[in-house]
């Protein structure tokens, strides 16, 4: 029983430790007009990457 309790506590500690850095990151700053949407096929996308 003691091992199960220790394992459960360890799992909770690991989950909390992983969540802390995720909340520390700032959300990206978006401003109007910065995003351009272009419809490309897969082939056009590959050609654009090669240039």
Image (cartoon, rainbow, N blue to C red):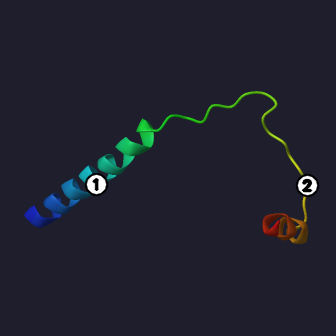
Q: Tell me, yes or no, if residue 1 can be seen here.
A: no
- According to the image, label 2 marks what residue? 39
| Drawn side of residue 29 relative to residue 21, left or right | right
Q: Tell me, yes or no, if residue 18 can be seen here.
A: yes
Q: Quadrant of residue 14?
A: bottom left
> Residue 18's spot in the image, x, y percent?
35, 50
Q: Eyeballing the image, is 5 above or below 20?
A: below
The residue located at (16%, 64%) in the rendering is: 4
**Which quadrant, please, contains the N terminus?**
bottom left
The residue located at (19%, 62%) in the rendering is: 7
Q: State which mark lies toward you, 2 or 1.
A: 2
Which element carries disc 1, helix, strand or loop? helix
Mark 1 surroundings: few (<14), some (14-19) or many (≥20) residues within 10 A: few
| Drawn side of residue 3 relative to residue 50, left or right | left
| Drawn side of residue 31 relative to residue 21, left or right | right
Question: Depth check: 15 or 23 in front?
Answer: 23
**Which numbered disc covers residue 14?**
1
């Amino acid at each position: 029983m003691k091992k199960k309790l220790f394992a459960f506590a360890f799992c909770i500690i690991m989950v909390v430790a992983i969540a802390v850095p995720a909340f520390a990151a700032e959300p990206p700053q978006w401003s109007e007009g910065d995003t351009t949407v272009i419809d490309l096929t897969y082939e056009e996308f590959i050609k654009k990457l090669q240039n």
